[in-house]
Amino acid sequence: MLNTSLYKTKISGIGSFLPEKILTNYDLEKIVETSHDWIVQRTGIEKRHIAGENESTSDLIVKAAQKALEDAKMSVQDIDMILVATVSGDLKMPATACLVQTKLGARNVMAFDLSAACTGFVYGLHIADQFIKTGVYKNIMVCGAESLSRLVNYKDRETCILFGDGAGVFIVSRAQNTDQNVIMTSSCHAEGAHAELLWMEAGGTKMPITPDVLEKGQHFMKMKGKEIFKNATRTMAACCHESLNAADVKPEQLDWIVPHQANLRITEAVAGQFDFPLNKVISTVHETGNTSAASIPIAFDIAYRDGRIKRGQTILLTAFGAGLTSGSVLLKF
């Protein structure tokens, strides 16, 4: 029988993994009409990690998950559910989460994928929080992972300069009554009317893959950059305000904002909405590019392991993505 009182959710452990192979801006100069300076000026990106020929999205997750379990001082047998946020899973079916389950040697637990593009990890935390709060599960593995290098057209300068591969994992758990380091609030939204600002036209049931589709390149990711920039700034700022207001927390009380690592100019614009100092915004986009659903946990883990993020700090996560989706999570780490 379920407990009718709500529990609280804490972050027990985190981990991330970036593939060894690196694609620099100078490498891209040889592939498409662009330059290192042009890319840095517009995006802040200098390089991105690319999954190896024999590395799949589930492989990246497993390596990140092992680090998160170690950080949480847990065994995989402690995990009650595996949630994978991705738009670049190993297969159309089954879910990549099921492949992660068997590769990790996890128990016969609930495992599923979530598709919310770059907001996927925030959506995942929002959902996992409900399972923990209501007493259904005690320990949930929330994964954000992408192999987007396999979904972009390297003849399209608009997209190929942006995206990289990687994985990040949070272990979220039921907190003790006395624990103050918990998820304080979260919110998620979607505006489907803007779906065609960032999308993959083919590959679903509406337009299956055919020789004609492949020839026209309709299976690749497409983006309207200027419109995405405008909507990203608007939706991320709105979600930040929503979570801060819900928890009665002022921007100056935050130790860090960890935004989706889409583009440094977007990050700067969102921080500007709060007059929030950029030295309190975690940015790793220069070394990872946009890793979509993986970007927030990767950036968080990098800053945690280099000592910037510390236990007890108040941290705001915020993201936007194709859909258009958006969301935020406010937590005491």
Image (cartoon, helix red, strand yellow):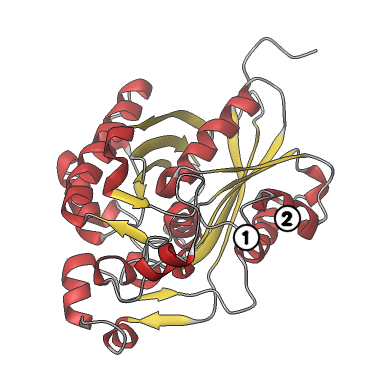
Name the residue nearer the viewer: 119 or 311: 119
246 up-or-down from 37: above or below: above
Which residue does the image show at 24% across and 60% down from the upper left?
264
Question: What secondary structure is marked by label 1?
Answer: loop
Residue extending farthest to the front is: 212
Which residue is pictured at 16% across the width and 40% down the height?
273
| Residue at the spot 35% in from the left edge and 49% down from the top edge | 259
* Amino acid at pointer 2: Leu
Numbered disc in front, either 2 or 1: 1
Q: Residues within 10 Å of mark 1 (few under 14, many from 20)?
A: some
Would you identify the image quadrant in which residue 316 lies? Answer: top left
Is 333 positioned to the left or the right of 176 in the image?
Answer: left
- Residue 309 visible within the image: no
Q: Position of residue 241 (x, y in %)?
A: 27, 30
Q: Are marks 2 and 1 in contact (CB under 8 Å)?
A: yes
Secondary structure of the residue carrying numbered label 2: helix
- Label 1 sits on what residue type? Asp
Q: Which residue is mark 1?
A: 90
Q: Where 167 sits versus 256, above or below?
A: below
Task: List x then y, in percent, for residue 332.
Answer: 47, 37
On the image, the x and y values in percent for residue 293 come to 47, 52
Between the residue at mark 2 and the residue at mark 1, the CA separation in whole angstroms equals: 8 Å
Residue density around tag 2, few if under 14, some if 14–19, many if 20 or more, within 10 Å: many
Image-based side of 33 in relation to 133, left or right? left
| Residue 112 lies in quadrant | top right
22 in relation to 269, above or below: below
Q: Sequence order check: which comes first, mark 2 or mark 1?
A: 1
Q: Which mark is residue 296?
A: none
Q: How many labels, in total?
A: 2
Residue bearing the label numbered 2: 99
Whether residue 30 can be seen here? yes
